[in-house]
Every structure is written in C-alpha cells, then in structure tokens.
Amino acid sequence: MRFQSTQIDGAFFIELDAHADERGMFARTFCEEVFAKAGAAMRIVQTNISRNPKAGTLRGLHFQAPPHEEAKLIQCVRGRVFDVAVDLRQHSPSFRRYVCTELAADGNRLFLIPKGCAHGFLTLENNSDILYYMGDAFVPGAGQGLRWNDPAFKIPWPAAPHLISERDATYPDFDVTGRR
C-alpha cells in the first residue's frame, strides 16, 4: 500500500498493491499495522455499504457532530464515484478545505477520511456501490450535514445531481465563522 497525503490534514489516498494473474486480482485493503506506520492509525469497528442504482445520485455531505466524529475508509466496490471530504475541524491547519477524487471498482484507490470531516459522493455510473470501513460506531441523533453546493466550499462537482434526498438538498449554508 502506498499512502498519498492530501490537502486535508490526516486524509490520505491509498493506492493498493494489486497482484493480478489469469484468475483476477488480489490486494490487501486494510492492515492496522501498515496504516499506523504510515501515520494513518485506524481501528475498524463497523462496515457499511451504500448501493446506488442510478448515475447522478448524490449523498452527502454528511458528518457526525462532536464528540461522535467518525473516521472513514472509503472503497468503491462497483461502478464509479466522485468522492469528496471537507475538513470541519476548527483548529485544523486545513479547516474548510476540501479534497476530491474519483474512486472506481476497477481502480486500486481508497480514500481515508479522518474524524471531523464531512463526506459525500456523486455516482458517475449506474449501479455504483461504496463500502465504508468505519473507525467509530454510528451514534443515532449525531448525524448532520452540509449542502453539496454550499458556496462556502465551492466544490467542483463534475455534474449537478439527478437524484438527491430532500434532507441533503436543503441543509443550511455553512456558518463561515466556523460554527455548525
């Protein structure tokens, strides 16, 4: 595994070392020891999958309110998505910065998002599935969000969504003073 730092402190793109032959491909997607040595320590306590049958589906930008922040390791296991993280940690050197990448099932890239960041994605193909390896357990009632097109961030989405929940479409603007 190769860890590439991003503009968000503690966020990494992880390129897998894939071994391919006539049978297909094999790659390790997580090793607690390797992650820790790379400065990306994480313990996985939960996994989730998001199934998205239609291209143009947007989910996010979601986060858990303090003190229930979640670290996430994101992998596209079917299809292709445009994936985004926004740093909401007020004392972080990368506060209010975003990072985006394309993740694809036929690619070898994962996205590690640290605690305190919002996350969202736009499906670029029909039948796109995202697997979440969670470093923290979900806490009911702690979920919050930012609007996908909030002018405070100016995220360069590749297209407007065709399918988005009412909740995700109507989150209020981010308070630029840093309050959420």
Image (cartoon, rainbow, N blue to C red):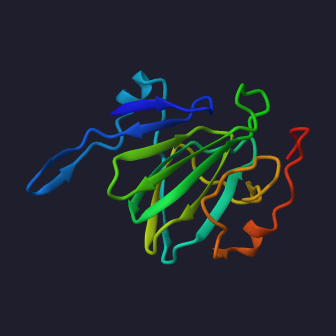
Along the horizontal axis of the image, is 122 left or right of 103? Answer: right
Along the horizontal axis of the image, is 175 left or right of 123? Answer: right
Residues 62 and 149: in front is: 149
Residue 96 pos. (x, y %): 75, 38
Residue drawn at point x = 64 percent, y = 57 percent: 157
Residue drawn at point x = 75 percent, y = 33 percent: 95
Residue 86's quadrant in the figure?
top right
Residues 115 and 127: in front is: 127
Q: Is residue 6 above or below residue 126?
A: above
Split into 4 quadrants, where in the image is the N terminus?
Answer: top left
Residue 9 pos. (x, y %): 62, 29
Residue drawn at point x = 60 percent, y = 59 percent: 158
- How many tags in the picture? 0
Residue 131 pos. (x, y %): 45, 58
Q: Is residue 123 above or below residue 175?
A: below
- Farthest residue, direction left: 22
Q: Is residue 148 above or below residue 175?
A: below
Q: Is residue 113 above or below residue 150?
A: above
Residue 74 pos. (x, y %): 48, 50
Along the horizontal axis of the image, is 59 left or right of 106? Answer: right
